[in-house]
Amino acid sequence: MEITRRPGKHARLRGRRRGRAPPRREQLELWDVEPRWVVPSAHAGGVTNGYDHPNRLGADRWTALVGARHRVLAHGAPRPALVVMVGTAVTVDALDAGGRFIGGLILPGFGLMLRALEMGTAGLKAPTGEAVDFPTNTSDALMSGGAHAIAGAIERMQRRLQERTGQAPMLLMSGGAAVKLGTIVELPFETADTLIFEGLLVLQSQRLAL
């Protein structure tokens, strides 16, 4: 590996360290796969994109919305849906009964909330706690604060969506940290960890049908 430096610039690394995975392009060549990138559009997969600039919506949110729309239809009559993905960030996205994405929230996830408190407040670095109703130690207080903040955003959006559409939305939750909200969110919900993959399958099947 070679390290080069230009005047006034940070050091750059050239070459590849031994034992490291090959870059994405080289890996795809090994698999003999031609990538097709998902680019959010104004309409696809039965979903209308209501973002001010449709192509600026995250591809993960877009494909999850498409997957959610088809999961809703698989359950029966069209109805609104609230799509929650809990990871590094938390997204809470609303679909109306006609399949239109009408907007959504982006919040910091559990880890980001805890790190922000650790960095900005002296003495709050503590082991990971549990989400409980009335915390009696700092670890549980930190985890419960984050969990209740996220749950409150979800429940508020659910109420707003129901008021706007006149129908009770289906709540779909996915992501590695969604399990932490299971006992906190006071709404019926369905765990849907494969929403993004379901959306990708819908988009691919429609592309092949053209």
Image (spheres, rainbow, N blue to C red):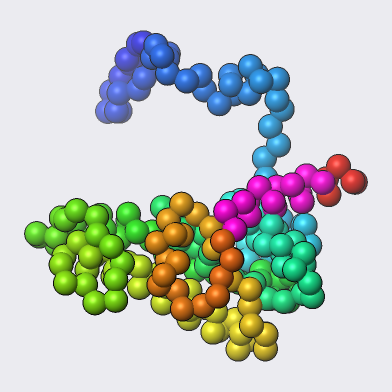
Image location of residue 13, percent across then percent down? 36, 19
Labels in figure, total:
0
Q: Nearer the viewer, residue 92 or 59?
A: 92
Q: Tell me if residue 93 is in the magenta stretch.
A: no
Image location of residue 110, percent across then percent down? 34, 59
Outermost residue toward the right in this view: 210
Q: Nearer the viewer, residue 200 or 15?
A: 200
18 on left or right of 74: left
Residue visible at 72% across and 76% down in the picture: 79
Prevailing secondary structure of the magenta residues: helix
Residue visible at 24% across and 77% down in the picture: 134
Residue visible at 75% across and 61% down in the picture: 70
Residue 6 visible in this rendered orientation of the protein? no
Residue 12 visible in this rendered orientation of the protein? yes
Image location of residue 65, percent across then percent down? 65, 61
Residue visible at 24% across and 55% down in the picture: 128
Image location of residue 59, percent across then percent down? 61, 51
Q: Tell me if residue 195 is in the magenta stretch.
A: yes
68 on left or right of 18: right
Instruction: Please tell me whether residue 187 is drawn above or below residue 40 in the rendered image.
Output: below
Query: In which quadrant of the rendered image does the N terminus lie?
Result: top left
Q: Nearer the viewer, residue 182 or 54?
A: 182
Instruction: Please tell me whether residue 210 is drawn above or below residue 167 in the rendered image.
Output: above
Q: Which residues are magenta?
A: 192-205
46 on left or right of 107: right
